[in-house]
Image (tube, rainbow, N blue to C red):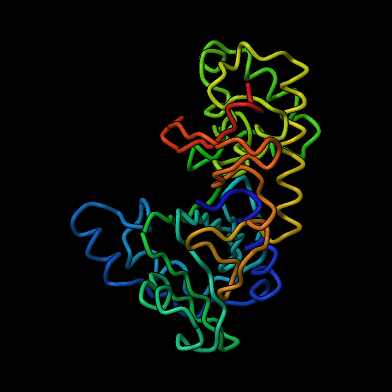
Amino acid sequence: MPELPEVEGVVRALSPKIVGKVISRASLSETIYQSHQLGKQCIVKNMEPAAFEMALSGMEIKRVHRRAKYIFMDLEKDGNPFLLVNHLGMTGAWFVVQKEEDILEEKFKKHIHARFSLTTGELLIFSDIRRFGEFRLLHTIDEHPPLLQIAPEPFNQNALNYFLAKCELPKYANKPIKEVIMDGQVISGCGNIYATEALFHVGIHPARKTGRISKERKIALFEAIQKVLLESIEMGGSTISDYRNINGEAGGMQHRLKMYGKKICPNCSANTKTMTIGGRTSVYCPKCQH
């Protein structure tokens, strides 16, 4: 699943291509329509597909920005502001092309679920192979309360103190540290890949209870998370499985990962081990992490 660096990469690439442009027509896939008829709300949430298409038509894209793992598009229509919130899910990808045939990878071309025709002639396309992505059209962020519970951005001045305070709460102190740092209400945008890397960097076992880690080590861990997230942003994110930036572009961080997906520890050459924490496979070195 794309994490903060991958979503940041999408935003940076998407913004100059679409900001200031107007959506002349929005069109959703038959898959979305059928899912809503069955009450499953695939991709488009809390809104009927036809109403979503009608609402988006004529909207100007004023700004594209990121919050945690979400893409926010500030829109305006007839002087009224709207917010389109998008989550990439596991396999969501954006394309800005002249025609659908310009999408080179067949797997993305086969799973187009939203087409936004721009008045400048381009197509803004959202493809999602596994259909775990989301769209929510809001007037304000308050209309979807979970967005208000997201932790501060990890680069914000108050993020470290927020993280330390959360770790002291009983609901987090008794959980494995790996599960805690992947919780978006504790640290914003850190998922399995970068949690694995940060824990390895500071030598903390992913299953160690949060309350049994000293404040000093928690601070070192938080700083390691910041460092690996910033490095990944610079590298364009990690292209693992089906993640792409936009228009099929891959990132380069996967070549710098030291522990995620590794069989041998790069520090001591021991065989790595895996365990399931918070529903995710955790890779760690049994000698270097304790």
Q: Residue 21 in the image: x percent, y percent?
A: 63, 77
Q: Residue 162 in the image: x percent, y percent?
A: 70, 24
Q: Farthest residue in the front direction?
A: 269
Q: Residue at x 32, y 68 (%)?
A: 50
Is 150 placed above or below 71 here? above
Determine which quarter of the picture holds residue 272. top right
Is 22 placed above or below 174 here? below
Choose between 153 and 173: the one closer to the eye: 173
Say how many tags the image has.
0
Q: Residue at x 60, y 28 (%)?
A: 186
- Answer with left or right where residue 235 lies relative to residue 24: right
Q: Residue 36 in the image: x percent, y percent?
A: 25, 58
Is 244 placed above or below 288 here? below
Is 55 placed above or below 138 here? below
For the C terminus, the image quarter is top right
Q: Farthest residue in the left direction?
A: 38
- Answer with left or right where residue 35 lies relative to residue 12: left
Choose between 79 and 199: the one closer to the eye: 199
Q: Residue at x 67, y 69 (%)?
A: 13
Determine which quarter of the picture holds residue 77. bottom right
Q: Residue 88 in the image: x percent, y percent?
A: 49, 57
